[in-house]
Amino acid sequence: MKKTVLFIILIIFVYACNERKEMSSINPENWSNRTANINTKDSLELGKSYLSIYSQIYSQSEHKTHNLTVMVSLRNTSDLDTIYILQAEYYDTHGKSVRKYFKQPIYLSPMETTEIIIDEMDVSGGTGSNFVFEWKIPKNTPEPLFEGIMSSTMGQQGLSFTTQSIRIK
């Protein structure tokens, strides 16, 4: 009986060690379902936005940090037109690319929102992480809005704050 119990525990341990936890929780199917083919001759306006986010913040001193869950909200602010997000690239504190979220342009229908979630245990971005988004919109269409919502809860205390993107091109 002891050997059977030990064997079962060993199997569970081996499986748990081999399980890989995705550090950014958006199902890739979400992007493939939104893939858009954009004709290069379309008269769409090209833009680029910068969004600061914080996967960690300092607490008490520069030697103690708290991890945060980050929700990056990608919003189409137009109630009439579909917009296109060409790229969403995540950078760390030192400006090094951590990951790109989709390989082909995606679309957002009028007033639609989608999110990118960075898990609390993913500290690859550090205290000064950020995103750069490239997008295309029809002329006279409101620009997309990119927001970061950072939060954490410990015991009975919670912390949350937001950031908004700025256009850089």
Image: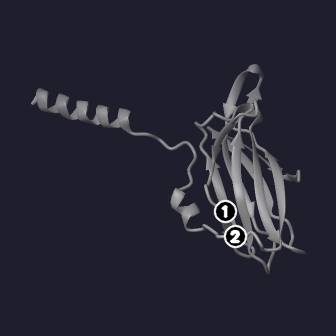
Q: Earlier in the sequence, mark 2 or mark 1?
A: 2
Badge 1, how many Cα within 10 Å: few under 14, some, many 20+?
A: many
Where 147 sits versus 160, above or below? below
Where 114 sits versus 163, above or below? below
| View extreme (bottom): residue | 80
Which residue does the numbered mark 2 point to in the structure image? 38
Percent coordinates x, y for residue 80 in the rendering: 79, 81
Question: Mark 1 and mark 2 in contact (Cβ < 8 Å)?
Answer: yes
Q: Distance between the residues labelled 2 and 1?
A: 8 Å
Q: Looking at the picture, which amino acid does disc 2 mark?
A: Ile
Q: Say which mark, if any, is on residue 105.
A: 1
Left or right of 92 in this view: 45: right
Percent coordinates x, y for residue 165 in the rendering: 83, 52
Q: Which residue is drawn at 12% across and 27% down?
A: 3
Q: In which quadrant will I find the N terminus?
A: top left
* Discs 2/1, front: 2
Q: What element carries label 2?
A: loop
